[in-house]
Every structure is written in structure tokens, then in C-alpha cells.
Image (cartoon, rainbow, N blue to C red):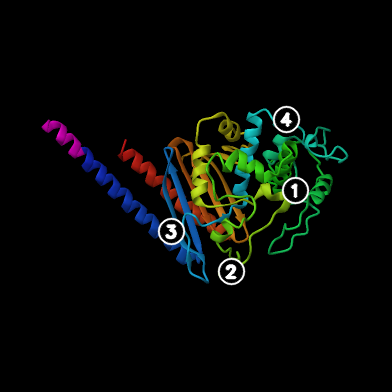
Amino acid sequence: MKNIIVIIFIMLSVSCRSQETESKSWDKLDKLVNKHLAEKHIPAISIGVVKNGEVIFLKGYGFADLDNQIPADDETIYQLGSVTKTITGHVLANLVKEGEMSLDDTLSQFFPSILKFPKYSNGNPITIKHLATHSAEFPRYPDNLERVDPDPIKGYSYEQMLTGIQEVNIDTVGGYRFNYSNFGYGVLATAMQNHSNTDFSELLEDKVFTPYNMTNSSLQLTAKNIKKLATPYLEVNPSVETEPWDMGTMAGAGNIFSNVKDMSQFLLGIMEKNEINKIQQTPLFKIREHYFYGLGCFVIDSKKVNTRLIYHGGDVDGYSSSLKYYPEYELGTVLLTNYGEGRVIGEVFMDIEVYILELLKSTEKNNP
């Protein structure tokens, strides 16, 4: 009996020391984030961390609204920008798994037959796989889009998209090179919408938001989530307000609004071992050595962090985002901010993400 009591006491002592160490480590993360906020004049950053099938950290730093001094928290809403593509790719993976669509389907199957679709130089048609892996030779933005700040895509209608598709000029074969295209992902989401005969927002609810309990996420701003929306600030001057984008028919490329609480649930979903995630996370297009693209996600054997990495970043004027999943460590992170300067926030995000990765690798090593 005494031996059992001693063992229990030792286990409790080790557990308490582990929790104390982890608490101090999160305190160091607080200092790191607040240091970046102060030095880079970043209004706010919200962070979510999942590990081994659980959400282990949710927190907001700084201010969602500078003028009114409203603090950011784990429920603060941000526009995701291109992290939206990972969710769009997840919808596609669902449809492929269900047999509703195939990656080899031609784009023309999902649009009016009267359209004159561009073809590759060898005469082959554009496929869904080409669009989903940015290898369709579509331009970054359609040629018939007149970009006007602060919302450069607002007003791009379905009719304009049909015209834009026909204006695409291709002088090479499909699947030949990586050519990142917001237009392509807008067309991809519209193709899924046309096939399903339902709005893309409803597809998102059915395939992603409801299954993963993402109750505060939406394709467009709603009366519910606008109350928690972080004020976006200009890239060139983080003290000057701008406004969220309305990407219209190109919404599948970057329009989703969400928070770190919901996106942590999405991370848990894509970390499960199932057929949908296998379809999405399979390296489908080689960009360069150790660097691939799946369905809406980069798949990388990263030398920087010495592990495999599945991720996407996002950046619109006034918001930036980062979603990362390290399969080897069953670890995922999501960072959201109302600051839109790509290079600066990219370096800040990387610093924070590497700290979290090293912290949890160390914790796992010390607590087998």
C-alpha cells in the first residue's frame, strides 16, 4: 500500500512540474507575441494550437479595434484570405470521395455548353485537378477585372466570370508549371456550386462548418459574426482602417470569415486519418524538390523545421492568416491578424510558429 501511495505521489509531482513548465512556456509565448505587436505596430494576433486530437491553446493579443480599445480574443473574427483555399479544397475532397466529382473531370462539364473554353497547346481540355493544383495556366486575377481599392474584387459577377474564362490565353500544356491563381480557385468553387445546384456557402455549411462545429464561420459577413469582426488596417499604415473584401464569385479563393476557435476545430478535422484527408493532402503537383501542392494546401518536406508540413497562408489588405499542420507531431497551429503586410507578418508568424513547434516537441520528449 505504501509503495502505491509513493508511486501516485511521484506521478502527481511529475504532472504538476510538467504543467508548471508548460505554463511558463506559454508565458514566454505571451512575451514573444506582445514584443512583435509593439515593435511591428501590429493591432492584433489570435492564436490556436491543437495537439494529439485536442485544442490546447486559444488566445488573442492586442486590439481587434484600436480606436475603441476592444481586445482581441479567441472569438475575434478575421477574413482568412487564401487559407480559404484549404477549406475550398476540403469541399472538393468531399465531393471526390463521394463520387460526385473526379479530379479528371473537365472544367467545361460544369458550365454552360455555349462557352468557348480555352484549351492547352496540345488540344487537351482544362481539368478540375489543374485548377485545384494551380497548374491550369489561369492568370492570378481575370483579365476583365478592374481592381479598385479598398475592395478590388467587389462586383465581379457570374456573367463576368463566364467572360473571364473565355478570355484566358494558354500557350502551353496543362499540368506543366505552377501558376498560382485566385481566379482559378474562384472558378473551381463555382464549378462545384454549379454541379451541386446549390450556393457554395451552403456547400461549406454542409461539408465543413456543420461537421466541424464551426459555428462562427461563414463565406460572407453575417449579422452574427460582424459583431466580433476585427477592424482591418491598411498594409501601408496599420493605424488607418480599411474594409473587408467582398470577392463575389471569386469567394472560394479567399473570402471566408472565421476565428481561431473555429479554425482549431477545422485543424482537428483535417488531422484525422480518413479518406477525405488523404485525398486532399496527397501531393498532386510538384512545384520543386520537397515542395508540392495538394487540394488547396501546400505539402512540404520542410528543412526549416525538419518535418513534413501541410499549410496555407492568406493575405488580403487588412488581414493575414496562417494554417499549419505537422503530421509527425500531430500538431496544428492557426494564426490570424488584422494586419495585412505580407513580408513583415510572415516573419512574425514564422517566429511564433517555430517557438510553438519547438516547445511542444520538447514537451513531448520530456513527457513520453
Write down the residue under mark 4.
104
Q: Give the position of the C terminus as an image quadrant.
A: top left
Query: Dividing the picture into quarters, in which one does residue 360 lie?
Result: top left
How many numbered badges does the structure rendering display? 4
**Figure check: 189 above or below 259:** above
Q: Amino acid at mark 2?
A: Asn
Q: Earlier in the sequence, mark 4 or mark 2?
A: 4
Tell me the chief SS of the magenta region. helix
Q: Residue 26: give its label.
A: none
* Gap between marks 3 and 2 measured at Cα: 20 Å
Rendered location of residue 5, percent (x, y): 15, 35
* Gap between marks 1 and 2 measured at Cα: 29 Å
Q: Earlier in the sequence, mark 1 or mark 4?
A: 4
Query: Dividing the picture into quarters, in which one does residue 166 lie?
Result: top right
Q: Earlier in the sequence, mark 3 or mark 2?
A: 3
Which residue range is magenta in the image?
A: 1-10
Residues at marks 1 and 2 touching, judged by CB atoms closer than 8 Å: no
Q: Amino acid at mark 4?
A: Asp
Question: Which secondary structure, mark 2?
Answer: loop
Please name the residue shown 51% across and 71% down the image. Answer: 68
Write down the residue under mark 3.
33
Write down the residue under mark 2.
237
* Gap between marks 4 and 2 measured at Cα: 45 Å
Q: Amino acid at mark 1?
A: Pro
Write down the residue under mark 1.
139
